[in-house]
Image: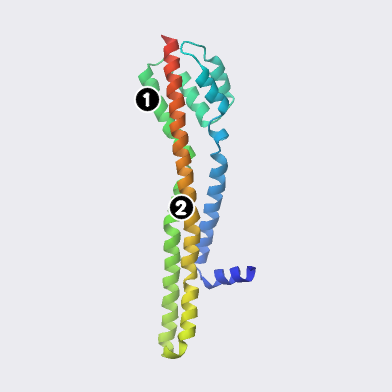
Amino acid sequence: MFDSIFKFLQTGGIFMIPLGICSIISLTIMLERSFALRRNQIMSSRLTSLVSEMHGGGAFAHIQAASEGDHSPLSRLILNCIHQLPFSKYENTESLQTKARAEISLMERGLVILEIIVGIAPLLGLLGTIAGLITIFGDVSGTGQIANQGAQIARGIAEALNTTVAGLVVAIPSLIAHSILSKKVEGYAVEMENICMELLSKLYTASR
């Protein structure tokens, strides 16, 4: 099995090296973002419950204390809402939106690299295949015995196509991961927006 894999990589030529680097980077980002985007890392159920249970006109000190000890994107947005309470609701909302964009950008960290890999991996594979075909037909034209080298040409073409296969093998999981992780970030963003807008509504009911 390992001999077959090694032969597959070896016959792919020099373009297997950047494809291998792309695969390592892609796998690293997928694992890191999957760990970082776990729900309890983004928004704790405790904070969500505290905001939901808060009544307009009620105290918010316990929510502030819980947020200060949480260190999640949601907790930072909640603290931003509380710290901007002396300003008008409109100004607070504007500040919240700015902070939310920064938090979403942090959650999306690395996803743009996945997107780039999705684009370049198949192109690298295709480039490797074309380079291999050029070499094959260049060698055959030099000998002038195309008719007698059919089997050798077919084997060479099959080996040249290895880079195309490798490019797709790298790109397809990267595309799936990018789609899933992007959807997850989008879902978290909507949830956090709803929670924070609910909190703002209750905070300004309390401040009247």
Residue at (42, 67) in percent of width and height: 127
- Name the residue carrying label 1: 94
Residue at (51, 16) in percent of width and height: 54
Task: Say if residue 46 shows up in the picture.
Answer: yes
Q: Residues within 10 Å of mark 1 (few under 14, many from 20)?
A: few
**Outermost residue toward the left in this view:** 90
The C terminus: image quadrant: top left
Image location (x, y in percent) of residue 46: 57, 25
At label 2, the amino acid type is Leu
Task: Say if residue 110 shows up in the picture.
Answer: no
**Quarter residue 140 falls in:** bottom left
Residue at (64, 68) in percent of width and height: 2
Circle 1 SS class: helix
Circle 2 SS class: helix
At label 1, the amino acid type is Glu
Vertical placement of residue 114 versus 51, above or below: below
Q: Earlier in the sequence, mark 1 or mark 2?
A: 1
**Outermost residue toward the right in this view:** 2
Mark sitting on residue 85: none
Image location (x, y in percent) of residue 112: 44, 47
Mark sitting on residue 175: 2
Give the spatial CA distance, label 1 vs label 2. 34 Å
